């Protein structure tokens, strides 16, 4: 029996563009309007509103059998999260139909379903009631939820004082322990630390072993491979393929295994972000040798970034995670913190050659306030390939590891003996 049937689902949104009569806004005007919107100022009467049609999902169909563990993979903007919101009944499809058999628990973003003024204890009972659980059932699982989330000391603290990590731990613990027939998890688990992620994957395996159904969105392909028996590959709102996890991940990696060294948005309205910050440009600039056309393990690269800030008197810095193609973070770089006001922020960082191994890499970009609060998090901001190069090395097997540093290395024979 199918737990979920998805039939020709499409979801349309309208993007509202504001422009001044007589032509599009320039950068200065866009920044001024952005700041005005933060403080509730009305736009000038001399503006025209234009609506752009955008299809987040387009004619998607697939079935999820009871007990299936489905991974949904694809770039940012592929429609993964929109699909989960449709399945969770958070939003209705524009066309098509979804049939769900069973009670759904969803964890789609930090703090999903929490009431900010209520304590952790009260929110456990509130979420349980929303899921249709009786009070006796919630009490039966209460101690397990608290222990899994690790919030014993803060159980009677209003959740508005919780950190994002505490939000995620409690949200996942509630969703996983109150025995839904269908568990839907978005990339939100990436907020937790490595130990918590391992706990979550272990719990999801326990849930799936009990015959319940899981839909899991993650950029960590290793986690998808480990947990899911089937996968769906999404691209620009359309389903590219559905099938066995290993084959789908292979197809996904082969289709995205391209170099994409620059991403740029001309106006804040077009750019990814929110009412606090928006990304303008991310560019990876290889420092090629004469005659070189592709990045290889010897090539130094410069990473330049630009973003619009709309926050007054903000202490901001940029954090960048360099990830392997399967989603593991290899290392993190953080910029110095600056005192920022509304305007354009720019910067760059240099990566030496003979550092990363050959392979495909992505960069996750986070704009951070006060060295603790993530204002915006852009997954896969840039993707790039590094080719192999051996020079005088005569061994041609795969060089192990994600990094491949070239350090001074001496070796000599100190004396000879007759043999």
Image (cartoon, helix red, strand yellow):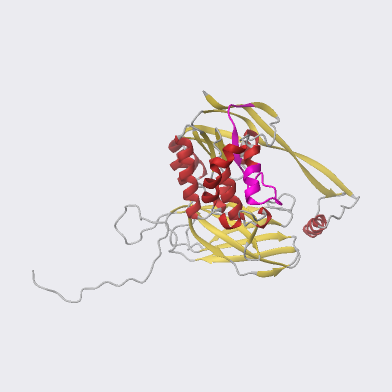
Could you say where residue 144 lies in the image, as x and y percent from the top left?
Answer: 52, 46
Check residue 118 for magenta coloring: yes
- Position of 239 with respect to 225 (left or right) is right
63 is higher (above) or lower (below) than 118:
above
Question: Magenta part of the protein: which range?
Answer: 98-126
Q: Quadrant of residue 234?
A: top right
Q: Quadrant of residue 156?
A: bottom right
Give whichever of 278, 170 is nearer the camera: 170
329 is higher (above) or lower (below) than 123:
below
Could you say where residue 384 lies in the image, as x and y percent from the top left?
Answer: 52, 53
Looking at this view, name the residue that lies furthest to the left: 419
Quadrant (top left/top right/bottom left/bottom right) for the C terminus: bottom left
Residue located at (54% from left, 58% from top): 321
Does residue 178 appear in this view? Answer: yes
Could you say where residue 57 lies in the image, as x and y percent from the top left?
Answer: 65, 35
- Position of 232 with respect to 298 (left or right) is right
365 is higher (above) or lower (below) than 207:
below
Give whichever of 131, 325 is nearer the camera: 131
Residue located at (11% from left, 73% from top): 417
Looking at this view, name the residue that lies furthest to the right: 45
357 is higher (above) or lower (below) than 189:
below
Check residue 245 for magenta coloring: no
Looking at this view, name the residue that lies furthest to the bottom: 414
Does residue 111 appear in this view? Answer: no
Could you say where residue 193 lies in the image, as x and y percent from the top left?
Answer: 52, 55
- Position of 105 with respect to 245 (left or right) is right
Give whichever of 287, 376 is nearer the camera: 376
């Amino acid at each position: 029996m199918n737990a979920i049937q998805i039939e020709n689902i499409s979801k349309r949104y309208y993007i509202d563009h504001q422009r001044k009569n007589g032509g599009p806004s320039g950068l200065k005007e866009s920044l001024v309007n952005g700041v005005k919107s933060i403080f509730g100022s009305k736009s000038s009467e001399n503006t025209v509103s234009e609506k752009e049609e955008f299809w987040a999902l387009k004619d998607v169909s697939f079935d999820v059998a009871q007990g299936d563990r489905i991974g949904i993979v694809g770039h940012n903007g592929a429609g993964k999260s929109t699909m989960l919101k449709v399945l969770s009944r958070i939003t209705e499809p524009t066309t098509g139909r979804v049939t769900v058999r069973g009670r759904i628990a969803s964890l789609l973003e930090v703090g999903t379903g929490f009431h900010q003024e209520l304590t952790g204890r009260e929110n456990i009972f509130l979420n349980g009631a929303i899921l249709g659980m009786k009070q006796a059932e919630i009490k039966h699982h209460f101690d397990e939820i608290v222990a899994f989330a690790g919030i014993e000391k803060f159980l009677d603290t209003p959740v508005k004082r919780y950190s994002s990590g505490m939000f995620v731990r409690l949200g996942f613990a509630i969703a996983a322990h109150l025995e839904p027939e269908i568990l839907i998890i978005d990339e939100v688990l990436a907020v937790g630390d490595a130990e918590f992620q391992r706990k979550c994957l272990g719990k999801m395996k326990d849930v799936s072993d009990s015959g319940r159904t899981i839909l899991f969105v993650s950029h960590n392909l290793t986690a998808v491979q480990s947990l899911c028996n089937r996968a769906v590959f999404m691209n620009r709102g359309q389903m590219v393929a559905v099938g066995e996890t290993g084959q789908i991940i292979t197809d996904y990696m082969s289709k995205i295994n391209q170099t994409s060294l620059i991403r740029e948005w001309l106006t804040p309205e077009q750019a990814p972000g929110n009412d606090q910050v928006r990304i303008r440009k991310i560019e990876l600039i290889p420092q090629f040798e004469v005659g070189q056309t592709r990045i290889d393990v010897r090539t130094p690269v410069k990473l330049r970034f630009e973003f619009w800030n709309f926050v007054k008197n903000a202490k901001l810095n940029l954090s960048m995670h360099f990830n392997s193609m399967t989603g593991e973070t290899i290392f993190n770089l953080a910029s110095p913190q600056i005192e920022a006001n509304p305007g354009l922020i720019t910067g760059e960082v240099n990566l030496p050659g003979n550092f990363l191994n050959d392979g495909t890499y992505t960069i996750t970009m986070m704009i951070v306030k006060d060295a603790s609060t993530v204002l915006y998090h852009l997954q896969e901001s840039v993707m790039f390939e590094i080719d192999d190069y051996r020079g005088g090395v005569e061994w041609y097997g795969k060089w192990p590891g994600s990094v491949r540093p070239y350090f001074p290395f001496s070796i000599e024979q100190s004396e000879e003996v007759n043999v």
